[in-house]
Amino acid sequence: MMTLPQKLLLLIALLFQSAFIYAEDNSIPISNLTNPARSTGIQIGDVLQRSMTFETSTPQNMITKALPAKGTRNDEVELIAANIVRMKDGSKNQYKLELRYQVFTNATRSKVMALPAQTIKISSTEQLVLPAWRFWFSPLVETSIVNAKANVQPQLKAPTIDLNHHAMGLKVFSVMLILSIIGLIYVNANNQWLPFCKGNFAPAHKQIKLLSRSKVSDANRLKKALFSLHTSFNKTYGSNLFANDVDEFISQHPRFKSLDQQILEFFTLSNQTLFSRDRQDDPELLLKLLSISKSLRDCERGV
């Protein structure tokens, strides 16, 4: 005969066994259970994440309500986020559950801790059973801090960035930049103090540019521009240059051969302007002279 206490113990055991079998029958199969990649060296404040995939016909809003509340603590591990995402629709929807935990403990010695085992009842007939995941907690110091200096941990020096493979490219681009600046100076400079810029047409081009930009109406500015360019031709030729001397000028200075039409155009324009009684101060004529003088200056410099 069994005594009354023995009967009570047997009844309790049977109830626990029935509850366990019921829980196993109602648990949803979990696939792709992913735990944190590192299980050692976990320190205070570290965030650990685990995720899992499962299938169920329970609506997503019911699953969301059944998830553990944010801020729930279990053995110095706090749940800081719980997210459910529907991955695939069907007769049974596929969901992905992500749980994020943060470690909060003041232990001064290494110890084994765990992300808690959890049973999430998502409906009256289905539940998720999550196993515990154990990890080693590492304190920042071995014992309680008595002397802060004695417990200072060396900082890991940040790795330096190797710039050697960029050095050659930087040098090439620097040389290209310098050459480009020098080229721009020689193409656009009007001063004669620069090397290889001591031609006769640079001062004429500079003066014509100033005259063309002047907003003050001057009846003689076209004549000034023509005389300036005539002076440059005369210095280059060695004496006064006239329209019928253009062929001889080009034979003496063959680099101007490509500009023979512009030179003849200049002398035609000069004759029409200087020997005309009508006042001529057309801005278009000044711009044409500016273009001719620039071409002569660039040709003289070999640009």
Image (tube, rainbow, N blue to C red):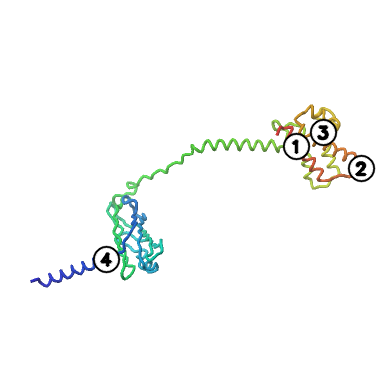
On screen, residue 42 versus residue 233, left or right, reads left
Q: Residues within 10 Å of mark 2 (few under 14, many from 20)?
A: few
Secondary structure of residue under mark 4: helix
- Alpha carbon distance from label 3 to label 2: 23 Å
Residue denoted by label 4: 25
In the depicted structure, whether residue 210 falls above or below residue 132: above
Q: Which mark is residue 277?
A: 2
Secondary structure of residue under mark 2: loop
* Residue at the (29%, 59%) spot, across then down: 131
Residue 302 location in percent, x, y? Answer: 71, 32
Q: Nearer the viewer, residue 218 or 266?
A: 266
**Quarter of the view holding residue 156:** top left
**Quarter of the view holding residue 26:** bottom left
Mark 2 belongs to which amino acid?
A: Arg
Residue denoted by label 1: 295
Q: Which of marks 3 and 1 is nearer the N terminus?
A: 3
Tell which residue pokes out farthest to the front in this image: 91
Q: Residue 231 carries which label?
A: 3
Residue 170 location in percent, x, y? Answer: 54, 38
Mark 4 belongs to which amino acid?
A: Asp
Residue 49 location in percent, x, y? Answer: 36, 56
